[in-house]
Image (cartoon, rainbow, N blue to C red):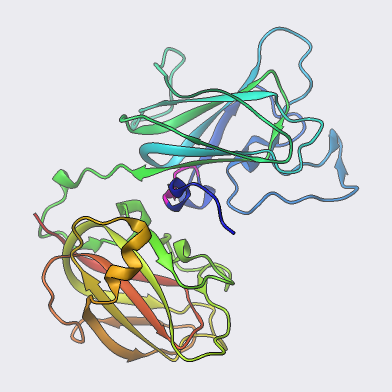
Amino acid sequence: MDNRPDFTKLVNLASSRLGSQAIYATDDFFADKQRLVDDAPAEWKEDVYDENGKWMDGWESRRKREEGHDYCVVKLGLPGKVVGVDIDTAHFTGNYPPSASLEGCYCPDGEPATHQQWDELLPSLDLRGDSHHFADVSSQKPCTHVRFHIYPDGGVARLRVYGHPEMDWDRVSTEQELDLLAVENGGRALACNDQHFGHMSNLIMPGRGVNMGDGWETARRRVPGNDWVILSLGHAGLVDRIVVDTAHFKGNYPDSLSIQAAFVEGGTDDQIATQSLFWRELLPSQKLSADNIHEFADQLNRLGTISHVRVNIFPDGGISRVRVFGRKSD
C-alpha cells in the first residue's frame, strides 16, 4: 500500500534528470553531495569501500570535531513553489544526522551570494535511520535554490523537494506553441490504473527516454479491458498536435492508443479518474509501432480549451513520452 503524502505526486524540483545540482557542501568527505539529488532509489553495496571509507549512496560528511554543523546548497532543476519534502536516510543507520532543516531562496540570475537572504521552508525535524521523512512546507515564494542543513553531521541518501514549477504564463503569448504537458511547463501525472514497470511521471519528462525503464509500462493484461493514465496540462489550452513516443518499446508497445480530454473545473486529484469516464474523444484510436515517434494533427477532434487528458492504451504495454503541443487559453 502506498501511504506517501499527496504532495509526492507533484514534481520533484530537486531531480537530477531535470538539471538539479548540489553546488556546494561544507563537507562531503565520505559521499559526494551530488548523489543527494539522484533520481534512482539509494542502493546498498555490501563490502564496497573507497579510499575514504565505506561507499554510501548519498551525501555524507565526516564526523565533526568542532562547533557548527554541515549543510549543502542545491540548485533546483526547475524553479518553483515548494509544497513538501522527503528526507530519505536509506541505508544510513549509525551515521545519519539526528535532525535537519531546509531553507530556500529565489536567485534566478546566478548562484546565491554570501549575503543572500534565505527563507525557512522547514524548521528542524528529528530524523531516524534508514527511513523516509515526509514533511509539508507552507511557502508562497518561489525558490531556485535550497539550503539543506544537517545537525551536526552525517549522511542522507536523498533529498526530494516537491512542488509546482514556476512558469510565468503572463509572458507566454496565446500564439506561441509549446508542450502544454511538459513537466517544465507545469504538467503533472495524476493517476493511472497500473504502473508495474515504469512510473507514469516519466511520460512528461524532458527529452526522449534513455531506455525502456524511462517510460510508463503496465503489467501484461490477463483480463478484458485496457490500461490508462490521466495527465494534467500546465495551463489550459487549445491543442494543435500530439506526439506519442514508444522509444525502446519493441516487443511490448501497445497495439493502439486513444486520448480523451476535458476542461476540468473543481474536484480533486483523487476522483479525477471517475470524471474521466465521460470525457470527450480528442484523438480516436490510432495504431502504434515499435520504438517510434508518432505525430497526430489532422486526426484530432477540435474540442476547444482543455486542461486534462486521459491516454488509453490497448490492451497494455509501454510508451515513453506524450507531448501535447498547443497554445494557452486566456
Q: Position of residue 327 (x, y in %)?
A: 16, 62
| Front residue (pair 121, 171) | 121
Q: Residue at x 53, y 77 (%)?
A: 218
| Left or right relative to 202: residue 68 | right
| Front residue (pair 230, 43) | 230
Q: Position of residue 277 (x, y in %)?
A: 29, 76
| Left or right relative to 7: residue 233 | left
| Left or right relative to 321: residue 66 | right
Image: 325 above or below 99: below
Image: 247 above or below 9: below
Q: Position of residue 182 (x, y in %)?
A: 34, 59
| Left or right relative to 14: residue 130 | right
Can you say which quadrant of the picture contains the C terminus? Answer: bottom left
Image: 55 above or below 142: below
| Front residue (pair 112, 219) | 219
| Front residue (pair 120, 146) | 120
Q: Is residue 13 magenta?
A: yes
Quadrant of the image occupied by residue 302: bottom left
Q: Which residues are magenta?
A: 10-14
Residue reaching furthest to the right: 47
Can you say which quadrant of the picture contains the N terminus? Answer: bottom right
Q: Residue at x 49, y 42 (%)?
A: 14
Q: Position of residue 132 (x, y in %)?
A: 63, 41
Q: Residue at x 54, y 78 (%)?
A: 248
Residue reaching furthest to the top: 67
Q: Residue at x 79, y 50 (%)?
A: 44
Judged by its main secondary structure, the magenta piece is: loop
